[in-house]
Amino acid sequence: MQLQLTFDHGKRFELIDAIDRYGDSVDIVEIGYPELVTFGLDLVSEVHERHPDLKLCVDAKVFHGGTGITRRCFQAGAHIVTVLAAAPDPVISQMVRHAHDYGGKIMCDMDGYKRPGGRTAEVDGLGVDYVSIASGYLMEHEYDLHKPQRRSLFQLQPLDLAGAVKRNLIHAGLAIGTGINESNIREVMELDPAIVMVGRGILAADDPVAAACRLKELAGEASPPGR
């Protein structure tokens, strides 16, 4: 299991400072989509120059134009680039091919799929290295609590969709994130993920370095037998 530190909000200097202080405590640092839109690939290049041995995931969420975007991300210092599962198959295939040119990897983002199983099998067959899905511990969007919400008879539980994704993977590794912390990392590890993506579980801790180390320790204790 690799521990990925995610950044999705914040000022440029805050992100750089956090990576300088905590980057060595994790296996991968993610430059989130909001940061990429706000600061561009110059931010990726800066982080790569400051920490050339640090593995970077650039959450580009590619949907089309896979060739050019993929090349630019890897040239800036990315090791992993993300693509949306909704992207056309040729785009994903192109990204996989160009990633190999740079010794990089492609992560396919399944978020938004209510029934991800079938598409998971398809993108796995296209050669992506990782397939990512939200844990289900936190909702991506907050609802207005003052308005009544319809509730279906069947409510998905945390990790349900992640489990459906895992069952349809043959070659790619599972990447799982959102709301993961010390209280639930053992449950997450039951799915034997390749990457666990953590943001506030590390960044909001009193001691982020200690939190990262503790997550790795708990993940090791909870890893399935034989791992």
Image (cartoon, grey):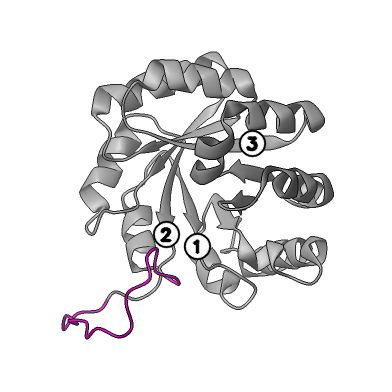
Tag 2 or tag 1, which sits nearer the N-term? 2
Element type at mark 2: strand
Q: Nearer the viewer, residue 184 or 204?
A: 204
Badge number at residue 134: 2
Badge 1 density bin: few <14, some 14–19, many ≥20, Cα 10 Å: many
Magenta segment includes 225 = no
- Of residues 107 and 13, which is closer to you in this image? 13
Residue linked to disc 1: 178
* Quadrant (top left, top right, bottom left, bottom right) of the C terminus: bottom right
> Which residue is painted at 66% across and 44% down in the image?
29
The residue to which callout 3 is attached is 56
Q: Residue at x 25, y 38 (%)?
A: 122
Count neighbours of disc 2 (C-alpha within 10 A) and say few if under 14, some if 14 to 19, many if 20 or more: many
Quadrant position of residue 107:
top left
Q: CA distance from mark 3 to mark 1?
A: 18 Å
- In the drawing, what numbered circle is on residue 93? none
Query: Does residue 56 appear left or right of residue 18 in this picture?
Result: left
Instruction: Name the residue type under label 1.
Output: Thr
- Rendered location of residue 163, percent (x, y): 36, 62
Residue 158 at what x, y percent from top left?
40, 73
Residue type marked 3: Leu
Compared to residue 219, the image places residue 74 above or below, namely above
Give above or below for 76 relative to 188: above
Labelled pair 3, 1 in contact (Cβ < 8 Å) = no
Indicate the secondary structure of the residue bearing disc 3: strand
Q: Residue at x 38, y 60 (%)?
A: 162
Q: Position of residue 18 (x, y in %)?
A: 76, 51
Q: Determine whether 136 is above or below 149 in the image.
A: above
Residue 1 visible in rendering: no
